Every structure is written in C-alpha cells, then in structure tokens.
Image: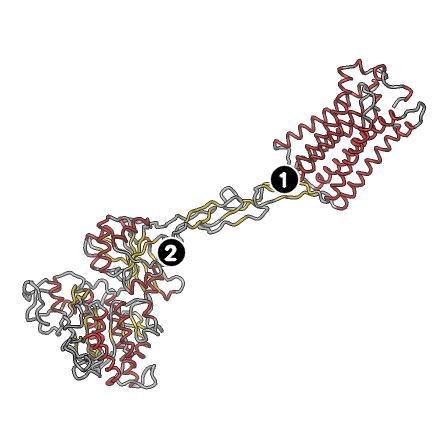
Amino acid sequence: MKSSGFLCGIVLCLELLYLVPAEPQPEPLQCSLIAGASALPVLQRTGDVKLGGLFSLHDMVLEADLSFTSKPVSTHCSRFNLRTYRWMQTMLFAIDEINRNDHLLPNITLGYKIYDSCSASFHALRASMELMGGVEEGWERSCRGMVPVVIGDGSSTLSVAVARFLGVFHVPQVSYFSSSSSLSNKAEFPSFLRTIPSDMFQVNALVQLIQHFGWTWVGVVVGDDTYLLEGAQIFSEEVCAMASIVARIRSSGSRVVLVFALEHDTVALFDEVLQQGLIGVQWLTSEAWTTAFVLSTPSRFLPILQGSLGFAIRRLVHLPGLQEFLLHLNPLNPDTPKDPFLPIFWEEVFGCSLQGAQGGSVPGFKPLCTGSEKLENVRNIFSDVSQLRVTYNVYKAVYAVAHALQAIKNCEKGRGTFPLQNCPDTDSLQPWQLLQYLKHVEFFNLYGDEIKFDKNGDPAAVYDLLNWQLGANGQVEFVTVGTYDESLGTKKLHIQEEDIIWNRNQTTIPVSVCSNSCPPGTRKAHRPHFPVCCFDCVVCTAGEISNQTDATECVRCLPEFWSNEGRTACNHKEVDFLSYGDIMGITLLTVALLGSLCTATVILIFACHCATPIVRANNSELSFLLLFSLALCFLCSLTFIGRPSEWSCMLRHTAFGITFVLCISCVLGKTLVVLMAFRATLPGTNSIKWFRPPQQRAIITLCTLAQVVICSVWLAVAPPTPRRLTTHESDLAILVCDEGSALCFSLVLGYIGLLASLCLLLAFLARKLPDNFNEARLITCSMLIFCAVWVAFVPAYISSPGKYSTATEVFAILASSYGLLACLFLPKCYIILLRPEKNTRTHLMRCIDLTHGSF
C-alpha cells in the first residue's frame, strides 16, 4: 500500500500544485499542496464494504486557466443531467435493496462513495484518486480509505482514462454504459468489466440490419468521441461540421443515415437538419441515443425522427420499488440522506433556489422553494422508468459486486468454488482479490437474466430493436420490433417487419442504394473514385452471360454455345451452312439448273442436227460425251448445297473431281484429234489412225480412271466429313465439309489442273489452223477461262470463311462449266440455228483438203 500511496501523491502533485514565483533563491522551487484543492463533492455512506461510484452528473465542465503562476480557480461543472442522476440513485436503490436482503450478504452492510466526473477525463481522474483514498496533508505517501471496487463511469472516453489508472492498483471497475470495443483488451485494461455489451456486437447487429433490408448506400455521421469513433470505424473515418454533414447527406442521395453520436451531439445535428429542411431520410440510431429523452420529448424533432430505427440495451419492463424510491427524494426532508447533488437536481427540476438545504445554497437569481414541490407532480426523464436500460445495467453491476462478495463469504464458510487458492477476508479485502471473484460471477437475478462476464469482461450481447412511433397521446413511443442475440448462432437478428412504421409514416421499406441492382444479363462496373457500392450496369458482350443479380463478371459461353438475346443463358449456336433456303444457295441452285438446262438444250440441238457437217466434223461422239460430262459438272454443284452429311461430303468432292476430269479428258481428246489431223503433212500418211474413236475413248477412259483411283484412295484413307466451325466471336456454328486429307484434295485439283494445262498447251500449238476451221482456237479460249477460274479459286477458297468457301467452290465449278459450254458449243449452235448456209460440206472444205480424211 505504500507504493500505491506514493503514486497517488505524484499524480496529485502534477495536477494540483503550482509554482510560486519568488525572488532568486539558492534552493530549487518545491511543489506544495494547495489547501482544499482535492476536495470534491461526494455522496457517501459508511458500511462494511464501501462501493465506489463515478457518474457524469454534469454534461460539461468550465475549465480554469492553468497558468501555474497563481492559485487556480476551482473548476465549475454545468448542465446537470437528470438521466445520469437517475442512474446514480439506482445504485443507491440497489445497495439499499441488498442491505435489506436477508439472503444476500447477511450481516454485511454495503456503503458507497460516489463522485461526479462532470463528463471530463481530468475530472474523472481526480474523482478516481479520491476513491483510492485521496491525499491529505501529512499523508502524501499513503492512500487511505481505498474502495475495493468502482461502479462507473458511463462514457467510454472517461472509462478509458479511469481504467488505465485503476488497473495499476488492480481495482475492479464495472461500467454500466461504456461500450467501446477497446475496453475488451485485457492487456491494456486488466481490471475492467461492464454490464453493457461491447460496441463490436452493436456494429455486427447494425451490419445485419442493413443487410436485412438491402441498403447498400448508407450515410454515417460520427461524433468525436472514443465510443463513437471506434464503433463507427467500420463505416467511416471522417467527421465534419454539422452544416457540412447535412449538406453531404443531401448531396449523397442516401435515404438511410446512421448516426453514431451522444445525445448532446445529436441535438445539434438535428437542429441543423431542421434548419436546412432535410426530409425523407430514414435515421438509424446508435445505442447511445436510441431512447434519448432530449430528442424524443420536444415535438419539433418528430417530423424528421418519427420512424427512426435502432438498437438499444435490453429493457427491464419493471423494477419494483424504484419509482417510489426516486419520487421519495426531497432535499427539505430531514430523512433524506445527505446528498450534495440533490439541491442542484431540485433546482434543475423545479427552477427554484434552496437555502439551508443539503449542500447549502446554489448561486443564482431564482425564487426560493416553498417545500411543497413534489416529484410525482413533474414529468421528466428522471422519474420516467418506462425505459429501464442503462438504469438496469447499473442495477446489475451492483448485484454482480454483491454476488462476488457473497462468493467470498461462501469461501470463508467452505461452500462454492473458489478462483483463489486462499479465501480472502472480508474485513481486509484487497481489490485484486475481489477482481478475481467478479470475473467468475455467474447467477440469475430475480428477473430471469443471467449475469456473467466472458474472458474480456463483457456480458452476453442482447439488444432490442426499437422503432420510434407516434402514440395516441402525441408522444414518441419506443416500440420493440425485433431483437438481436449474439448467443443464438447464425440467426441472431429477428425482426417483425409488419410492426415497423418508417419515416414519414410509411409502411414500405425505404430503398437506399447508390446504384440499383444489376439484373441478369449485365455485370457491375465500378465507378472510379466512388465507394464499392456505386457501380454501373454494363450489358454482357455477345457470347457472354450472367444469370444472377449483381454479377461482377460475365461468363463466356463454350465455343459451341452462344448467349441469348437477354444475355442470361447459353444456347446452342444456330447451325449455318450453304442451304437451299438462303439467297446465296437459291442463286447458285438457279445458275446450276440453268446451266444444266442449257447443256440439255445444246444436246437436243446436236441430236436434231447430228447429220449436218458441223456436227459430224467435230466428232459427234466426243461432243455428246463432253456435253454429258458438262451436264454432270453443273449437277454436281448441287451436292455442295444443303446440310452437309457424311455421304454428301464424300459425294460432292469425288463427283466434282471425276466429272471434271471426264470433261477435260473429252476436251483433251478433241484437241489431240484436231492437232494430229492438221499436222499430217504427207498425203496418205497413217498417223491419224492412232487417234480414231476407239483410241479417243481409251484416252478418256484412262485419264478418268486415274482420277477415280485418286478419289478411291482419298475415301479410304481420310474421307471428307462434316465439321462445325465455331469461334467465340460468332453466334453461328458453320457446318462445312472438312476435306479430310489436304493432300488428296490437292491431288484431285492438281490432276484436273494438269489435264487443263495440257489441253491449253496442245490447243496453243494448233492455233494456226485454217481460219474457217477454228476448233483449236475455241479450245484455247475455253481452257484459258477454265484455268483462270481455278487459279483464282485457290486463294479465294483459302481466305473465305465458313460456308463462303463452299460457295466459292460452287462458283468456280459453275463458272468453268459455263466457260467450256459457251466457248466450245455456242459458236456451233449459232451456225446451226442462225447461219445454216455455213453448215455445208462445201463451206467446210474450202480450206480443208479432203484427202486428210474424215475425222
């Protein structure tokens, strides 16, 4: 105890002493106590065990100017708080109730020693030092009369300062209203306990409340206080002036605003809200002002605060005897215990001055009290016991201490469980001993509530969800519309939504979002320099989907799927191919059929004039075979139109390759006959016999058979098959025929090109034949067209996507077929039909020596 007294003396010296200026002295200046400087108003009563108490009975303190060169003026506390005075009286009521209880602490009388902390940290510290025994002249190094436990303080800011000081002495401190989460840190505050839940639980409850109603754009107003800053740091870290705060609320567009502030701060805020005419805001209250009398009583705040919603400490419906105890107070009654704060309370309630009453008179120009004033005739927050929340916490704190003392008494009698190896002696009880028992307190009070502390000194977190509703009498009623119980596992929050009346007397849940939810088919795009809840809804790009609300990303469909119009599902891509139904397919079909019809017409013309010289002179057998192969060329293009299948894919390429070789083989035969006939220079030569009709048929058969062999190998090794071409950028799946073997496909085309080149070369060699017999020139022209078409086909085919490559191949087939038909047979048809005079033997023989024979 000596070390404790020394510390008390040091702290008091730092705060309460001053330096006296004097003329230069040989010795250094010394600190000396100011007489009476440590005397603070105290409400006390003797007992076997005296409980300390700290209550902020005043809301502010007028500080003196400490120049340290003159004696400081005593500090003056102002703005008496009736609500806090009720809390203090509840402590007295609980102690009195325990002293009258024959079963709890029998033969032990509890006393008390209570100070006003004046809502100031330095004032709370001075009161704490007095509770530790104080310092009297001659006793600078010892603290006498130390209380073993302190009930209080209410403010978290004050409790932080007091808890650091009391923790040095291991004096247990049980707060009834300090909810700062930092006070749960036992390394920093080892002797701090409380009967109010930590703000961490309140924040969890508020978060679940906001999530329950789907509010994502919530404004937060934070007061400049330890309790408030820590409780709201999860929402905001910025504190502004009142006018600026209201302006920001208006400009933000938030329809729900949470206010973390003390009572006196909220009054200033809502005064500014009224002045600026800010309406239509749903206010969420923090536990500190959910049931604030100063806000709920004046009717001027009702238009903006009606419908407010917030959590409050669990309420006790009725505390028997409390109201009678409160109303029994009277400073003029000699039976009332001496209370230095009672005259101030009386003058605050009735507005009259007391003289000769307890504590002396209070300065001021007020009428004297008559003695007929009665508290039951006045309605104020002091006598209002309808919302016993913090009041009930004070009551539970006193009973927790009483049960800890009872556990010590039981230890002395050998009953119960004991946290210490040796039982303490109540006659010489040390604070650290009582602290250990307080930590292990666990009991149910008369009202069914379990009182115990967890390892952090916190009680079980249970809140009522209150709704400010206007009663029939025009007064605010705090209607319980839900509860929050931290011990209930996953479903901690229960709300009766149908009982809630929202701001401006609305029954529908207000909407407060920075951005409306993004529907399926869109994704959220965060707005730069805005909170995370502010975003734009961007439609998913083609080929991507989102099938849930507020999707952060769009999901790309698989290659064979494509997004629907709403971008909410992936459907199978529409299969696209060169069909008979689209314009391109119809056009190619028409051209192919027209070519076949033209070929049939030429066959008909040649058949009708088969005996004429021009038909006979051109080897009618080869001409008819060539016309037949051309008709097949036109018709084989039809296999390229329509839905590709395994059979159609194999047919189209083999039919194309064989019919074109047959066609070019016929042209080659005609070219060889023409060339050999006019290169025989000697009459009677026998070279033409090698190119008569049987030899011509053999040449055509061998040339065609070679292509048949190539196509057979192709079909056997790697036949063409249908294949889907899909890309992430297209909504169509292109169905085409895959060549199977690029080598075989190249051989088929290469062989056709080889025969065509050979025909072109031979026709070029026969270009100087007599003018009237111009078959070689016609063959040369047709082969030039044929080769030009297929040379242009190769790059066009390679570069054309999907069905357009098929269309390119069909176009090449039709163009080359039309070229052959037009160049080889159009002039002859012209002569047969329009110039029959030239279709005579005499005309043909003008430049031809008949000795060359018929060919």
Q: Quadrant of residue 179?
A: bottom left
Q: Which residue is mark 1?
A: 801
In the rendered view, tell whether residue 743 sits above or below residue 456. Answer: above
Q: Quadrant of residue 434?
A: bottom left
Pick the front one: 394 or 784: 784
Inter-mark Cα distance, 2 to 1:
52 Å
Which residue corresponds to mark 2?
211
Q: Is residue 100 visible?
A: no
> The disc labelled 1 sits on which kind of residue?
Pro
Query: Where's residue 707, x and y in %?
Result: 79, 38
**Relative height, residue 50 to residue 83 (above, below):** below
Mark 2 Cα shell of 10 Å, populated few (<14), some (14-19), many (≥20): few
Label 2's element? helix
Quarter of the picture containing the C terminus is top right
Q: Are marks 2 and 1 in contact (CB under 8 Å)?
A: no
Label 1 element class = loop
N-terminal of the pair, mark 2 or mark 1, is 2
Q: Amino acid at mark 2?
A: Gln
Q: Quadrant of the N terminus?
A: bottom left
Viewer-side label of 2, 1: 1
